Image (cartoon, rainbow, N blue to C red):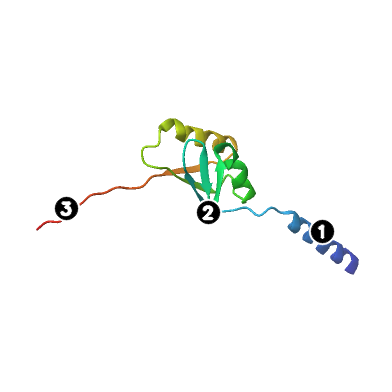
Amino acid sequence: MWKSIATALCLLAIATGCATTRLTGEVEIQLINASSVSIGDKIVGIADVPGELKAMGAGPETAIHITVPRNMPHATLQQVLKPLASAGFRKLVFVTERHAEAEAKK
């Protein structure tokens, strides 16, 4: 009996050790220009973004927040969107800076 319990515990330990850690929640990246993206302190090419995110543990359920500079052409946004969608990322959010002006009444 003890042998079967020990075997079961060993199998459980092996199975748990093989599990990949998945990043849940969200990841923020920043579009620098038409060919570069900043992920944390690292700057990578647009084509390398899906691999970098997967290496961080991001998956289909991870929300990817993409900060976009003001006046970025729509074609550039598509260049970022396509490889991420093709890699299985489903929660893509483009974020821009908000600009508001207010005038104080006298």
Contact, mark 3 vs mark 1 (Cβ under 8 Å): no
Is residue 1 visible in the rendered image? The answer is no
- On screen, residue 43 above or below 11: above
Q: Read off the residue under disc 3.
A: 103
Q: Read off the residue under disc 1.
A: 11
Query: Is residue 61 left or right of 103 when viewed as pictured?
Result: right
- On screen, residue 73 above or below 99: above
- On screen, residue 60 above or below 20: above
Provide residue 72's location: percent of width, then percent of height.
40, 37
Tell me which numbered mark, 2 or 3, is placed earlier along the sequence.
Answer: 2
- On screen, residue 105 above or below 47: below
Q: CA distance from mark 1 to mark 2?
A: 30 Å
Amino acid type of the residue tagged 3 in the rendering:
Glu
Tell me which numbered mark, 3 or 1, is placed earlier along the sequence.
Answer: 1
Disc number placed over residue 89 in the picture, else none: none
Query: Is residue 86 left or right of 33 when viewed as pictured?
Result: right
Amino acid type of the residue tagged 2 in the rendering:
Gly
Q: Nearer the viewer, mark 3 or mark 1?
A: 3
**Pointer 1 local density, CA inside 10 Å: few below 14, some 14–19, many at least 20:** few
**Pointer 3 local density, CA inside 10 Å: few below 14, some 14–19, many at least 20:** few
Q: How many marks?
A: 3
Q: Nearer the viewer, mark 2 or mark 3?
A: 3
The image quadrant of residue 5 is bottom right
Q: For the point 40% across and 33% down, which residue is it?
A: 73
